[in-house]
Image (cartoon, rainbow, N blue to C red):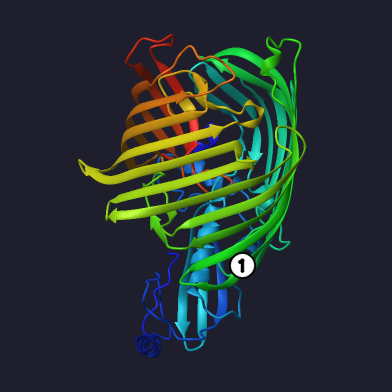
Amino acid sequence: MSLSRLVGLGLLVAPASLMAQEAQESHECVVSQLEEGLTWPEGTEITDIDINVDPIFGDPDSGAFPWLYHLANTLHISTRDSVVERDLLFKEGDKLDPLRLQETERLLRSRRYYSQAKVTLDENCADGAKVNVDVHDVWTLEPHVEFDKSGTESTYGYGFEETNLFGFGKTLLFSKYSNDQREGHLIKYHDPNTGFYRSTLTLLAADNDDGHAYSGSLIKPFESLESTWSAGLNGYDVRQQRYLYDASIEYDRFGESDNFAEGFIGWRLGDVVDNSVTRLFVGASFRNQFYYPLGITQYDTSVPEHQHGTTYWAELQWLKHDYKEMVNLEAMNRIEDINFGLVSNFRLGFYKAQTGSVDTGVRAQGGLSKYFQLSDNQFIQASLSSTGLFDGGTLYDAATAGRIAYFHKQKIAGENAQFFAEYKEASLVRPFGHHYLELGPTQGARGYEARYQTGEHRQVITLEERWYGQHEWFSLFYLGAALFYDAAHVWGDSPVDLSQEGWLHSAGFGFRIMTNRLGGREGGGVSVLHIDFAGPVGPDRPVDSGQVLVTVKQGF
């Protein structure tokens, strides 16, 4: 969460006869946007690909600080053409496929070292098609200054992060950090496309005062609907202290050692039909969770039982691509690629334990996610996910989470605005490792301190009136604002007897700051700085009357 980080696909295909007429008149067919239902000459071949990398500031002489804009353009190492080319899902000699162009544009927009990406067809005539690929660079070498404050919980850190190392698209991060639970330092390397089967490589190592954390993954993804296979390896080794809280006050702690490893391979089943695809994955997951008392542990009963086992699983995934380019839905003044198609998956596995509560069992996991468009300015997003381990009719280590969000885009006094309403619910059943749900400002109770409630069930209701500023201040950032009301509570079994139960109500206002001149988030999305002022509403509770929350989130 870095404060410093916040400082068309186009293919218009005309009928073949019209294209021939235009070719005769100008020998150049200019096409700017893909429109569903139109056609193009069958078998048109891509004869040329032109890659253009735009600087951070396209017109450095405009704006308040031209010297700063020129300096940024001069010092920044531009993304190399080879990096852009490696992400293209087409090449010269391929038959023109508008879906591949669309998917390429979305893939490029997900890269954190671009603020914009556009794939357009410049020529589509008798001699073939010329494709233009335009990306817009951002400033990627950033001092990694972290400061998050949520009630009594504060996090700070410093270091640096380069998200486009020497223009090759790699990320290198060094950071030292401290929060209310631990302090330490870490190094991270991330490559979104190694060039080896378009695989993604991530490595992380952290040394903390209470242990360590190491993780790594090498994933060959399904980069497009047409992709036929995927595979991956990932794992982590974490050793740390775990804390239990009541009303934001530490109640107890214990030690945790958690080791995980997983490997999988996936295949596309059948052809792509109506932008829909079915995929099959098979894999194996190993996990060893060991817990131990500390010298300061107050109650030995708070130390969870050791869990050690392997799951052999198979998963079916069904998804449909129905993407639309949106602005000011879940982010601010940035193109958002929203999929209105259904995304779903179901996994079934056999679990064999070495130690723990379960000897053998069946682990099931599934999820659904979809956006709905009610009108030109009203949208709903709904998602549901669930996982659990069944042994002899008893459910263990189960987790269910659901969300439904309503977006109503508005114009207030000529400015872009939105009414936003969200309901979220989560539930656990016999969770391993005392991984109970928490409730505080980051989970939807902005007027309260971190970890104010813990338990097995959580409900959160959020209402917001949002304002999206359209002016880019100093050619650097956009400013937005929000009025909000939260209602949330956690209940059910917990390793700690709660002293503060019932619904927590809070209200307040906040500011949102976002920039298109700095990098986005890993895997897509944009960072938005939230500065919120919130207070509790309702019955008196042992909590400060006002909270100042400074956080960086993905979206508004």
Residue 532 is left or right of residue 169, and the answer is left
Residue 179 position by quadrant: top right
Q: Is residue 7 visible?
A: no
Image coordinates of residue 330 in percent, x first then y, are: 40, 44
Quadrant where the C terminus sits is top left
Q: Residue at x 49, y 44 (%)?
A: 526
304 in relation to 218, above or below: above
In this view, the residue in front, 417 or 292, is 292
Q: Residue at x 47, y 53 (%)?
A: 58
Q: Is residue 265 visible?
A: yes
Image coordinates of residue 13 in percent, x first then y, are: 40, 77
Q: Which residue extends farthest front?
A: 392
Q: Residues within 10 Å of mark 1 (few under 14, many from 20)?
A: many
Q: Residue at x 65, y 41 (%)?
A: 392
Residue 417 position by quadrant: top left
Image coordinates of residue 499 in percent, x first then y, are: 48, 11
Query: How many discs appear?
Result: 1
Q: Which residue extends farthest right?
A: 354
In this view, the residue in front, 500 or 546, is 500
Q: Residue at x 51, y 76 (%)?
A: 97
In this view, the residue in front, 72 or 448, is 448
Q: Give the SS element for disc 1.
A: strand
Residue 422 is left or right of residue 78, and the answer is left
Image coordinates of residue 328 in percent, x first then y, are: 36, 47
Residue 375 is left or right of residue 371, and the answer is left
Quadrant where the N terminus sits is top right
Q: Which residue is mark 1?
A: 268
46 in relation to 256, above or below: below
In this view, the residue in front, 498 or 15, is 498
Q: Amino acid at mark 1?
A: Arg
